[in-house]
């Protein structure tokens, strides 16, 4: 099938720099996606955008180039609840990728078992209105209860302004919860202002809540420029991510977010994104927790490396 990309779609960056920051051995890129290829894995009819292709082979080449050892492939909304492309990537990874799926209430136990065997360890609930249609909370709670029996967790994606309304649902979930991109704070607001304090309180009061400190390129207002001298890329995101890493060092994850869906202004060089890591996890100990120990504990607990 031929797919026409969404108007203005920016393709992922080819030829990324070799990062200056050397990742610790065994590092995991804990948030990335595959898109199609559309001819093999058609995009979902209910999708809100049509991306460029971004195959498993290209993802694994990026992993090797940047110096990661493993990936966590998160189902992208352009594939709806058809997890075939993501599962295909897991199967082709020689055990070096685990996955997070999107499922509906009608998913069978056999399908869940099949996904588990392929390496799926979580489901994603998405509350970002520009990306998905509404799913009733009772359906999501039913799914969470079912997948908890497999030892899976729930990944949640939402905008910071929606946290108060979603609080009771989130805090009632029976699993580990992983928040995408720190709950998308408005980084033009103070890091100790009411909006981000609520997110910190969420993590403080609920020890089952983890956060990805990913996507500076998505959250930044100052952007990727001014790479030399005092100013570093995405500098306005640093205090937010650093605060979460330093306050909750055992419950943070990091990922590239390759192939970076829905960016409007610029496409990051993934090598540059890796160079962002020491700004938010300044010590070797924090870097190892963020990049190796935490993702291994959550996605490859059988390896017991931490
Ligand atoms: C991300 C962010 C976005 C998109 C998706 O599944 C998706 O379509 O996650 C976004 O547009 O903010 O984490 O990749």
Image (spheres, helix red, strand yellow):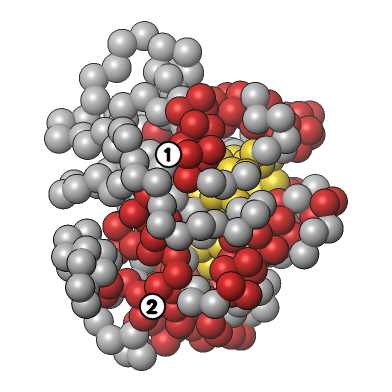
Quadrant location, the N terminus: top left
Q: Is residue 205 left or right of residue 132?
A: right
Residue that lies at the very extreme toward the top in this rendered image: 1
Above or below for 302 versus 201: above
Which residue: 65% across, 54% down?
25
Residue 108 makes an appearance in the image: no
**Dot 1 beta carbon under 8 Å from ligand 1:** yes
Tag 1 secondary structure? helix
Image marks 1 and 2: residues in contact by CB distance under 8 Å: no
Q: Nearer the viewer, residue 113 or 294?
A: 294
Q: Is residue 23 visible?
A: yes
Earlier residue among tags 1 and 2: 1
* Cα distance between the residues tagged 1 and 2: 26 Å
Q: Quadrant of residue 233?
A: bottom left
- Residue 150: image location, x then y, percent: 80, 48
Using the image as rendered, state which of residue 99 and residue 163 is in the foreground. 99
Residue at 34% over, 54% down: 272
User: Residue 93 in the image: x percent, y percent?
Assistant: 65, 30
Q: Looking at the rendered structure, which numbered label has been put on residue 254?
A: none
Q: Which mark is residue 240?
A: 2
Q: Kindly identify the residue that appears in the image at 62 percent across and 44 percent down.
A: 70
The quarter holding residue 104 reads top right
Q: Residue at x 20, y 73 (%)?
A: 229
Secondary structure, mark 2, is helix
For ligand 1, tell me if the residue under mark 2 lies within 8 Å.
Answer: no
Residue count near mark 1 (Cα–Cα under 10 Å), binned few <14, some 14–19, many ≥20? many
Camera-nearest label, 1 or 2 = 2
**Residue 77 circle label:** 1
Q: In the displayed structure, does residue 67 sit left or right of residue 192?
A: right
Figure check: 87 above or below 157: above
Viewer-closest of 291 and 185: 291
């Amino acid at each position: 099938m031929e797919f026409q990309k969404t108007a203005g779609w920016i393709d992922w960056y080819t030829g990324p720099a070799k990062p200056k920051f050397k990742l610790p051995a065994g590092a995991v890129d804990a948030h990335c996606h595959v898109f199609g290829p559309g001819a093999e894995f058609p995009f979902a009819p209910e999708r809100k955008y049509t991306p460029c292709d971004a195959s498993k082979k290209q993802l694994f080449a990026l992993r090797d180039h940047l110096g990661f050892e493993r990936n966590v492939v998160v189902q992208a909304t352009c594939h709806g609840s058809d997890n075939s492309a993501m599962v295909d990537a897991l199967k082709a990874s020689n055990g070096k990728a685990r996955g997070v799926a999107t499922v509906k209430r009608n998913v069978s136990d056999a399908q869940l078992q099949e996904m588990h065997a392929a390496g799926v360890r979580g489901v994603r609930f998405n509350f970002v209105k520009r990306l998905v249609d509404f799913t009733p909370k009772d359906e999501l709670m039913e799914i969470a209860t079912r997948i908890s029996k497999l030892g899976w967790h729930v990944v949640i994606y939402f905008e910071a302004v929606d946290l108060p309304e979603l609080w009771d649902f989130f805090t009632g979930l029976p699993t580990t919860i992983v928040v995408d991109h720190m709950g998308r704070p408005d980084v033009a607001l103070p890091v100790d202002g009411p909006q981000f304090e609520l997110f910190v309180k969420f993590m403080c009061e609920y020890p089952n809540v983890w956060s990805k400190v990913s996507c500076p390129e998505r959250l930044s207002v100052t952007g990727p420029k001014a790479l030399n001298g005092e100013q570093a890329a995405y500098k306005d995101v640093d205090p937010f991510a650093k605060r979460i890493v330093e306050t909750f060092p055992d419950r943070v994850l990091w990922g590239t977010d390759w192939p970076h869906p829905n960016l409007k202004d610029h496409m990051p060089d993934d090598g540059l994104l890796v160079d962002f890591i020491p700004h938010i996890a300044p010590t070797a100990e924090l870097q190892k927790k963020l990049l190796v120990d935490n993702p291994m504990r959550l996605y490859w607990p059988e390896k017991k490396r931490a």
